[in-house]
Amino acid sequence: MSEASAEDDNASERGNAETAGAASEAEEEGDEEEEVDEDDDEGEDEDEEPALKYERLGGIAHQLLQKDSASMLAYANQRLALGTHAGMLHILDLSGQHIKSLRAHSASVLDISIDLTGDFIATASIDAHDHLFGSLPSGQVVVHSLSGAETPSFNMKRPVRTVALEPNFAKSSTRSLVSGGMAGNLVLHEKGWLGYKETILHSGEGPIWQVRWRDNLIAWANDLGVKIYDTHSQTRITYIDRPADSPRADLFKCTLHWQDESTLLIGWADQIKVARIRARPRKTATASSLPPLLVEITAVFQLDCMIAGIVPHPLSQSASTSNALMSDALKKSNGTGSVRSTAPALTAFLVLAYTPPDMSLLTGNEAVSDPAEQARKQAERPELRIISRAGEELAADALGITNYERWNCNDYVLVDIDAAPVKAAVPGTAGERYYIVLSPKDLVVVKPRDWRDHVAWLVERQRYEEALEEIERRSGEADAAGEKDTIDAVQIGQKYIEHLISEGDFVKAARLCPKVCGQDTKRWEDWIFLFAQKHQLQASGADRALLQTIKTWPKGIYDISAVIVAVQSELEKAPSTSTKKPSGPDTVILMECLAELYTLNRQPGKALPYFLRLRRPNVFDLIKENNLFTDVQDQALLLVEFDQELREKRKQAGEDIDTDPVSAITLLVSHIHAIPVKLYAEYAPRRLIDFLRASNYYNLEQAYNVCNERDLVPEMVFLLGRMGNNKKALYLIIERLGDVSRAIEFAKEQHDDDLWEDLLRYSETRPAFIRGLLENVGAEIDPIRLIRRIKNGLEIPGLKGALIKILHDFNLQVSLLEGCQTIMNGDCADLVFKLHRNQTSGFFLSAKTPCPICNKPISQPPNGLILLFLCRHVVHAHCVDRGDELPHQPDSTLVDMGIGGQPGLSGKIAL
């Protein structure tokens, strides 16, 4: 294995191990002999949630296995193919419902292969072949078509153990399949003009125990190991040896599973190997004679059990750390030159584990002298184990298989199901992935646990608070996906309240009641009656809990007036005055209760004195929202004193309040300014718009409410414009006034392009508005933008005149632009001539002229380079940036002799 490949696998293993951390090491729920003490607190703390859930396949699966026993199971395209020891082939859907049954063989069906369409099914068996002189022992391979009459069969003369169809068998012209068995030949069957022809791909190394075909790669296992054949290059690309001390191959089967087009999982006896197929680098001359693909063993794991089945098991990708590791692993994998376009998914292994009851089977010493040891020992329960890419066991569940003590390793089959979703909750999501475990008398469906199972697990352990939090977190996702929530959150809440009451936590139970009971009066009555029976009504009706109850419980379940009378009677017993702050915590709570009760009873005027005495800052908002200016008249002094206290607190906090107006006085004065608006609206509505334009001393919202009550639309439009609600103002002009000119003027005043867009959208179905816009359109809007919005077939009166006006205005605008362009071109020419004349004219220069940078005469040094700019600045070359890079001037003596350049000033000036 190359170094790069090893690094990639290590990264994937680390990512898988971290992803599965929280869901690992599940408890063995299937073991009926294990007893858990629910009263043991330590046992509950260490209890881990299982990763998988189990149920038996429904439909007629149970009936089929009552008089027969299963031998093989395969899946493709939402169909299950079940083979039995009686030679029957049953086709079922994923719910176990019967589709079709075929008499495939006269003996046990040992292997099944289904093409991608699910229409063609190949079976292999050891049944006999009918002959003229009787039935001769042999093996047969039969290809069954569920939709046609084509049923080719092949007599292999010897028992056949395995078969594999070409993945795209239904659409292939060759209709290829490969089979093998006790004869030791791996035979490729291909359809030609004169029928099927047989090609032996491999032979001479013992029986072929299993073969699996994926894309262009065929993998098979014999007594010596696993080999892979490439159908494109028609070459065998690798040989993966089998350990010399391995147990018998006929007792502990080999399981080959293609995880994807470039990854093969090998489970044989107690060992797992992961083989990665990739393109061979073509860098050397010797590489051209080698197969185009090579195989790397990226992982090898030794288990303490026999492997009856192995499939990839995707890990949860909810954690951000796991996502980062997976992304990094995929990037590295793509850089290894893999022959496939996509890297294998980040997965663990799901292993069907079998523990041999007799260890002599592993050593090959089956013959013993003791008759007691010769007796067949009962097998242990099979287990499903989740093993990470690092070889760590994440979870292990014992399966409750019927008659498990009678079955051996080869009696079990593990199949992964990639079922399509019933309805696509989220576009682009894949279907549900789960598994089926087959035994001779059972079909067990194994599914990953979802959040609903997690909630049920929490409820079983009386962790109700966590369960409710999970339901609340997931409810939004279920609603967005359009799924019906099957979990009753109210029922779980009821159990939680019962649990809290049994624990004596009445206050917490009372706080939970509003969420659980909602508006259900009957449920409220039941819980209040229960609180009364427990003599714990104070938990929901006294002290601080009383205030919390008033704020949270629905007001329709109790008589507010009766509660007000009771609280007032209690308040009268407490010492307090109407002008000072209340003394004592009980008095404060009772006053807060009264204020809340009056507010709930729609009596904010009676709640106002209590808020003032409690010094609540929201008292100013309460006065404005409920128009309590009349109620506050008698308590104006108390309001001003309270405002002064707030200002003192702000001043002590370091805030500058000298420039802030007094809130109480501002509130009262603003109420006074609202009076003229009402008077104008009531007695002189025509003069109201002039007042609104001239005055700034009124509340905009109050003025708008006054105008809205009297349906004064122009005034409402003006106020909405001042409040910044331009869209609503424009809507009123269009819908209520129907004045297109006013709508255009309003849009021009606001200088808002979005407002123009709204005006155009409103006008699409109003011909009068379209004509008005065309007649009044100007620089604010492009006419083409408006014309393109006119729907075909829409009749617009006066459209011709409006278009003629647009064209006339456009021609006039073009003419003006052309005149301006002529004038500008003339001015540009004059300025360019003047600039050229100024830059090319001479100017006086002497040897004593100073350099503007160093202020030294330009003649020093004598042979130095001088730069002359068109702006008539003269500087030393060494005074400017990168001046040292300029070419040096030749010596003046040589120049005078006619060598090395031209004499004169121009030789020392760089233009």
Image: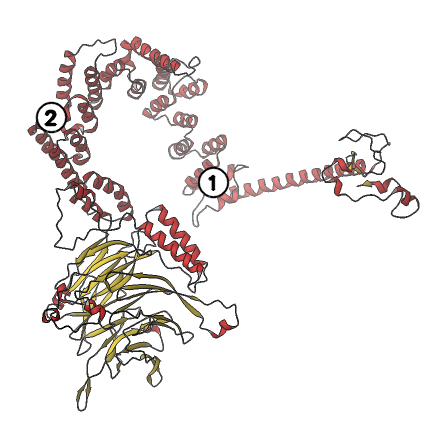
Q: Residue 106 occupies which quadrant of the picture?
A: bottom left
**Amino acid type indicated by mark 1:** Arg
Q: Residue 433, position in %: x, y?
A: 27, 58
Residue positioned 84% across, 40% down in the render: 908
Q: Which residue is mark 2?
A: 537
Q: Amino acid at mark 2?
A: Leu
Name the quarter where the C terminus is drawn: top right
- Kind of element beneath mark 1: helix
Q: Nearer the viewer, residue 42 or 759?
A: 42
Disc marking residue 771: 1
Pointer 2 local density, CA inside 10 Å: few below 14, some 14–19, many at least 20: some
In the rendering, at what x and y percent does residue 377 appear? 13, 66
Q: Is residue 128 left or right of residue 623?
A: left
Query: Which residue occupies 30% across, 10% down?
Result: 636
Q: At x 50% / y 73%, what residue is drawn?
A: 286
Q: Quadrant of residue 565?
A: top left
User: Residue 672, can we see it?
Assistant: no
- Quadrant of the image for the N terminus? bottom left
